[in-house]
Amino acid sequence: MTISLPTFRRLSLATLLLLPILLALALPPLLAQAPGAKRIRKPSMDDTIRANVYADNTFQLYVNGTLVAVDSIPFIPHNVISVDLLPAYPMTIAVLAKDNFNPKTGMEYANTNIGDAGFILKFADGTVTDGRWKAKCFSRGPVGGNTTNPRVEEEPLPEAWFAVDFDDASWARATEYSEDDVGPKQPFYDADFAGAKFIWSDDLKLDNVVVFRTIVATPPDGKAREDFTGINDVVPESPPRGPGSGKGRPQGKGKQR
Ligand SMILES: [Ca+2]
Ligand SMILES: [Ca+2]
Protein backbone atom coordinates (compact mmCIF):
# COMPACT_ATOMS: atom_id res chain seq x y z
CA MET A 1 0.00 0.00 0.00
CA THR A 2 1.25 3.46 -0.76
CA ILE A 3 0.30 6.62 1.14
CA SER A 4 -0.31 9.71 -0.95
CA LEU A 5 1.64 12.87 -0.11
CA PRO A 6 -1.45 14.84 1.12
CA THR A 7 -2.45 11.91 3.38
CA PHE A 8 1.10 11.71 4.77
CA ARG A 9 1.06 15.44 5.52
CA ARG A 10 -2.29 15.12 7.30
CA LEU A 11 -0.96 12.24 9.43
CA SER A 12 2.21 14.20 10.29
CA LEU A 13 0.16 17.23 11.30
CA ALA A 14 -2.08 15.07 13.47
CA THR A 15 0.97 13.51 15.12
CA LEU A 16 2.41 16.95 15.84
CA LEU A 17 -0.86 18.13 17.35
CA LEU A 18 -1.18 15.03 19.51
CA LEU A 19 2.45 15.00 20.63
CA PRO A 20 2.08 17.46 23.59
CA ILE A 21 -0.97 15.56 24.82
CA LEU A 22 0.89 12.24 24.61
CA LEU A 23 3.87 13.72 26.43
CA ALA A 24 1.67 15.20 29.14
CA LEU A 25 0.11 11.81 29.73
CA ALA A 26 3.32 9.83 29.60
CA LEU A 27 5.83 12.00 31.45
CA PRO A 28 4.43 12.08 35.00
CA PRO A 29 4.30 8.28 35.33
CA LEU A 30 7.76 8.02 33.82
CA LEU A 31 9.15 10.61 36.25
CA ALA A 32 7.40 8.93 39.16
CA GLN A 33 9.06 5.65 38.31
CA ALA A 34 12.54 7.17 38.25
CA PRO A 35 14.97 5.19 40.38
CA GLY A 36 14.66 6.19 44.02
CA ALA A 37 11.58 8.30 43.45
CA LYS A 38 8.94 8.02 46.19
CA ARG A 39 5.35 9.06 45.73
CA ILE A 40 3.73 10.36 48.84
CA ARG A 41 0.85 12.69 49.36
CA LYS A 42 1.07 15.72 51.58
CA PRO A 43 -0.26 14.90 55.07
CA SER A 44 -3.10 16.95 56.51
CA MET A 45 -4.33 17.35 60.07
CA ASP A 46 -6.68 14.44 59.38
CA ASP A 47 -3.57 12.23 59.41
CA THR A 48 -2.65 13.30 62.92
CA ILE A 49 -3.68 11.84 66.25
CA ARG A 50 -4.29 13.76 69.46
CA ALA A 51 -2.09 12.88 72.43
CA ASN A 52 -3.28 13.57 75.98
CA VAL A 53 -0.66 13.47 78.73
CA TYR A 54 -0.98 14.02 82.49
CA ALA A 55 2.02 13.89 84.77
CA ASP A 56 2.38 14.31 88.52
CA ASN A 57 4.37 16.43 88.24
CA THR A 58 6.11 16.94 84.90
CA PHE A 59 7.32 15.15 81.76
CA GLN A 60 9.11 15.19 78.43
CA LEU A 61 7.63 13.03 75.66
CA TYR A 62 9.64 11.58 72.77
CA VAL A 63 8.06 9.74 69.83
CA ASN A 64 10.30 7.84 67.44
CA GLY A 65 13.34 9.59 68.88
CA THR A 66 11.96 13.12 68.52
CA LEU A 67 10.94 15.41 71.39
CA VAL A 68 7.26 16.14 70.72
CA ALA A 69 5.90 17.53 73.99
CA VAL A 70 7.09 19.10 77.23
CA ASP A 71 4.91 19.79 80.25
CA SER A 72 4.51 23.57 80.25
CA ILE A 73 3.84 23.61 84.01
CA PRO A 74 6.61 21.75 85.86
CA PHE A 75 5.01 21.80 89.31
CA ILE A 76 1.44 22.81 90.12
CA PRO A 77 -1.36 23.17 89.11
CA HIS A 78 -1.54 19.66 87.68
CA ASN A 79 -2.36 19.97 84.00
CA VAL A 80 -3.05 17.98 80.85
CA ILE A 81 -0.90 18.56 77.80
CA SER A 82 -2.63 17.84 74.48
CA VAL A 83 -0.68 17.84 71.24
CA ASP A 84 -1.16 16.57 67.69
CA LEU A 85 1.19 13.86 66.45
CA LEU A 86 1.85 12.52 62.97
CA PRO A 87 2.20 8.84 63.78
CA ALA A 88 4.48 6.26 62.16
CA TYR A 89 4.62 2.61 63.18
CA PRO A 90 6.26 0.84 64.82
CA MET A 91 6.10 3.84 67.18
CA THR A 92 8.68 4.10 69.96
CA ILE A 93 7.47 6.20 72.88
CA ALA A 94 9.88 7.37 75.56
CA VAL A 95 8.98 9.55 78.53
CA LEU A 96 11.08 11.29 81.14
CA ALA A 97 8.74 11.77 84.10
CA LYS A 98 9.55 13.57 87.32
CA ASP A 99 7.82 14.01 90.61
CA ASN A 100 8.33 17.38 92.23
CA PHE A 101 11.37 17.02 94.47
CA ASN A 102 14.42 18.72 95.83
CA PRO A 103 17.39 16.98 94.16
CA LYS A 104 19.35 17.06 97.44
CA THR A 105 16.63 15.64 99.69
CA GLY A 106 14.02 14.01 97.45
CA MET A 107 11.36 16.00 99.31
CA GLU A 108 9.04 18.81 98.28
CA TYR A 109 7.40 21.91 99.69
CA ALA A 110 10.61 23.25 101.23
CA ASN A 111 11.62 19.78 102.40
CA THR A 112 8.53 19.33 104.52
CA ASN A 113 6.82 16.54 102.58
CA ILE A 114 7.42 13.36 100.60
CA GLY A 115 5.42 13.87 97.44
CA ASP A 116 3.84 11.14 95.37
CA ALA A 117 3.93 10.82 91.60
CA GLY A 118 2.08 9.27 88.64
CA PHE A 119 1.92 9.34 84.86
CA ILE A 120 -0.78 8.59 82.31
CA LEU A 121 -1.03 8.99 78.54
CA LYS A 122 -3.51 8.28 75.79
CA PHE A 123 -3.21 8.75 72.03
CA ALA A 124 -6.25 8.88 69.75
CA ASP A 125 -5.04 5.74 67.95
CA GLY A 126 -5.78 3.81 71.16
CA THR A 127 -2.24 3.86 72.54
CA VAL A 128 -2.41 3.93 76.34
CA THR A 129 -0.09 3.61 79.28
CA ASP A 130 -0.27 0.29 81.15
CA GLY A 131 1.82 -2.36 82.87
CA ARG A 132 3.33 -3.49 79.57
CA TRP A 133 5.48 -0.33 79.43
CA LYS A 134 9.06 -0.45 80.64
CA ALA A 135 10.03 1.74 83.61
CA LYS A 136 13.31 2.57 85.29
CA CYS A 137 14.01 4.91 88.19
CA PHE A 138 17.03 7.23 88.00
CA SER A 139 16.58 9.25 91.20
CA ARG A 140 14.96 8.29 94.49
CA GLY A 141 14.70 9.88 97.86
CA PRO A 142 14.55 10.48 100.68
CA VAL A 143 16.17 7.03 100.85
CA GLY A 144 14.25 4.74 103.16
CA GLY A 145 11.70 7.48 103.76
CA ASN A 146 14.12 9.04 106.23
CA THR A 147 13.07 12.68 106.52
CA THR A 148 15.39 13.41 109.45
CA ASN A 149 18.56 12.95 107.43
CA PRO A 150 17.19 12.90 103.89
CA ARG A 151 19.44 11.86 101.04
CA VAL A 152 18.97 10.76 97.46
CA GLU A 153 20.29 7.93 95.31
CA GLU A 154 20.61 8.66 91.65
CA GLU A 155 22.30 7.57 88.47
CA PRO A 156 22.76 9.52 85.27
CA LEU A 157 20.34 9.02 82.42
CA PRO A 158 21.88 6.82 79.73
CA GLU A 159 22.77 8.59 76.55
CA ALA A 160 19.93 8.54 74.02
CA TRP A 161 17.49 6.92 76.45
CA PHE A 162 14.79 8.23 74.09
CA ALA A 163 16.23 6.70 70.92
CA VAL A 164 14.36 4.14 68.85
CA ASP A 165 17.24 1.65 69.06
CA PHE A 166 17.94 2.12 72.80
CA ASP A 167 18.11 -1.25 74.54
CA ASP A 168 15.66 -1.38 77.47
CA ALA A 169 15.50 -5.20 77.57
CA SER A 170 16.84 -5.33 81.16
CA TRP A 171 14.31 -2.80 82.47
CA ALA A 172 11.37 -3.87 84.61
CA ARG A 173 7.75 -3.39 83.63
CA ALA A 174 5.91 -0.32 84.89
CA THR A 175 3.62 -0.67 87.88
CA GLU A 176 -0.02 0.26 87.38
CA TYR A 177 -1.69 2.48 89.98
CA SER A 178 -5.33 3.32 90.62
CA GLU A 179 -6.83 6.80 90.47
CA ASP A 180 -7.12 6.63 94.26
CA ASP A 181 -3.38 5.96 94.51
CA VAL A 182 -2.48 8.98 92.37
CA GLY A 183 -5.34 11.36 93.15
CA PRO A 184 -5.42 13.21 89.82
CA LYS A 185 -6.82 16.72 89.74
CA GLN A 186 -9.75 17.99 87.66
CA PRO A 187 -7.89 18.52 84.33
CA PHE A 188 -7.40 14.74 84.18
CA TYR A 189 -11.17 14.22 84.22
CA ASP A 190 -11.70 16.88 81.53
CA ALA A 191 -9.61 14.95 78.96
CA ASP A 192 -9.96 11.51 77.37
CA PHE A 193 -7.89 8.92 79.22
CA ALA A 194 -10.40 6.08 78.89
CA GLY A 195 -8.63 2.73 78.97
CA ALA A 196 -5.28 4.18 80.11
CA LYS A 197 -3.66 3.24 83.42
CA PHE A 198 -1.60 5.39 85.74
CA ILE A 199 1.94 4.04 85.80
CA TRP A 200 5.16 4.63 87.70
CA SER A 201 8.03 2.50 88.98
CA ASP A 202 7.32 0.26 91.98
CA ASP A 203 7.60 3.16 94.43
CA LEU A 204 5.14 5.99 93.83
CA LYS A 205 6.48 8.14 96.66
CA LEU A 206 10.25 7.77 96.77
CA ASP A 207 11.11 7.31 93.09
CA ASN A 208 11.25 10.82 91.69
CA VAL A 209 12.76 10.48 88.21
CA VAL A 210 11.45 7.64 86.05
CA VAL A 211 11.90 6.87 82.35
CA PHE A 212 9.17 4.95 80.56
CA ARG A 213 9.50 3.28 77.18
CA THR A 214 7.26 1.24 74.92
CA ILE A 215 6.94 0.26 71.28
CA VAL A 216 3.54 0.38 69.58
CA ALA A 217 3.88 -2.10 66.73
CA THR A 218 0.67 -1.19 64.88
CA PRO A 219 -2.21 1.22 65.51
CA PRO A 220 -4.14 -0.24 68.47
CA ASP A 221 -7.44 0.86 66.91
CA GLY A 222 -6.67 -1.17 63.79
CA LYS A 223 -7.06 1.83 61.48
CA ALA A 224 -4.75 1.84 58.46
CA ARG A 225 -2.55 4.93 58.48
CA GLU A 226 -0.13 6.17 55.85
CA ASP A 227 3.53 6.38 56.82
CA PHE A 228 4.88 9.88 56.21
CA THR A 229 8.39 9.10 57.38
CA GLY A 230 10.84 10.99 55.18
CA ILE A 231 8.20 13.48 54.02
CA ASN A 232 10.86 16.19 54.14
CA ASP A 233 12.99 14.32 51.60
CA VAL A 234 10.43 14.20 48.78
CA VAL A 235 8.14 16.54 46.89
CA PRO A 236 4.73 15.51 48.17
CA GLU A 237 1.61 15.43 46.08
CA SER A 238 -0.64 18.37 46.86
CA PRO A 239 -3.35 17.77 49.41
CA PRO A 240 -6.96 18.68 48.75
CA ARG A 241 -7.74 22.29 49.52
CA GLY A 242 -10.77 24.14 50.63
CA PRO A 243 -13.28 23.82 53.45
CA GLY A 244 -13.26 20.45 55.12
CA SER A 245 -9.83 19.43 53.85
CA GLY A 246 -8.33 19.61 57.31
CA LYS A 247 -9.64 19.70 60.85
CA GLY A 248 -9.31 22.92 62.77
CA ARG A 249 -7.10 24.66 60.27
CA PRO A 250 -7.92 28.16 59.02
CA GLN A 251 -8.42 28.15 55.27
CA GLY A 252 -7.67 30.61 52.53
CA LYS A 253 -4.71 32.64 53.76
CA GLY A 254 -1.13 31.90 53.02
CA LYS A 255 0.52 28.91 51.46
CA GLN A 256 0.15 25.51 53.05
CA ARG A 257 3.42 24.09 54.28
CA1 LIG B 1 8.35 11.75 95.51
CA1 LIG C 1 3.92 14.99 93.06
Image (cartoon, grey):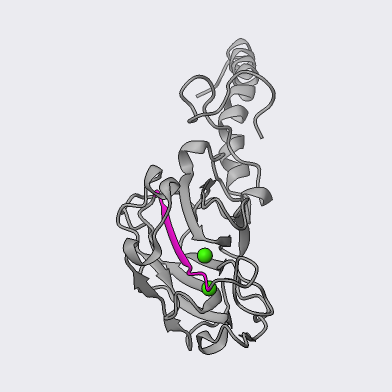
Report the residue at 67% width, 49% height from top. Answer: 232
Q: Position of residue 117 (x, y in %)?
A: 48, 68
Q: Position of residue 194 (x, y in %)?
A: 31, 52
Q: Magenta region: which residues?
A: 114-124
In the picture, which quadrant includes the C terminus?
top right
Q: Nearer the viewer, residue 183 or 252?
A: 183
Q: Nearer the viewer, residue 243 or 53?
A: 53
Report the residue at 58% width, 23% height from top. Answer: 250
Q: Position of residue 95 (x, y in %)?
A: 54, 66
Report the residue at 48% width, 27% height from top. Answer: 245
**Location of residue 41 (image quadrant):** top right
- Whether residue 83 appears in magenta in the rendering, the answer is no
Q: Residue furthest top?
A: 6
**Location of residue 43 (image quadrant):** top right
- Above or below — where is 239 with respect to 15? below
Residue 164 in view of the camera: yes
